[in-house]
Image (cartoon, rainbow, N blue to C red):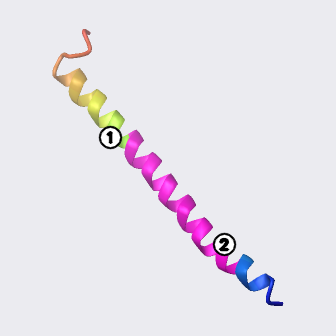
Amino acid sequence: MSEEEPSVARRGPTWLILVVVAAALVVCCCSTVIGLVVAGSAGLLGR
C-alpha cells in the first residue's frame, strides 16, 4: 500500500498543473482577443 500513496499524492499536483495551464491559456486567448479589438477600434488593422 505504500506504493499507492505517492501515486495519489502525485495526482493532486498534476491536476493543479493542468488547471494552471488551462487558466494561462484562457488568459492568453482573452488578452489576444482584447488586443485585436483595441487594435481594430484604433484602426491599426488597416480595415
Q: Is 25 contained in the magenta span? A: yes
The residue at 38%/48% (across/down) is: 27
Tell which residue pokes out farthest to the top in this image: 46
User: 47 or 20, which is in the foreground?
Assistant: 20
Mark 1 and mark 2: Cα distance apart in space:
30 Å
Rendered image quadrant of residue 12: bottom right
Please give the label number shown on residue 31.
1
Residue 40, image quadrant = top left
Residue 36 or residue 2, whichever sits in front:
2
Q: In this view, does 22 lie to the left or right of 28?
A: right
* Label 2: element kind: helix
Q: Which of the two residues, 15 or 3, is positioned nearer the viewer here?
A: 3
Q: In which quarter of the image is the N terminus?
A: bottom right
Residue type, numbered disc 2: Arg
For mark 1, does the 10 Å Cα neighbourhood hold few (<14), some (14 to 19), or many (20 or more) residues?
few
Magenta residues (range):
8-29
Give the residue drawn at x 73%, y 76%: 7
In the picture shown, does residue 35 fall above or below 19?
above
Coordinates of residue 2 in the picture (x, y in percent)? 79, 89
Q: Earlier in the sequence, mark 1 or mark 2?
A: 2
Q: Can you identify the residue that label 2 sits on?
A: 11
Q: Quadrant of residue 46?
A: top left
Give, as a three-letter code, the residue at label 1.
Ser
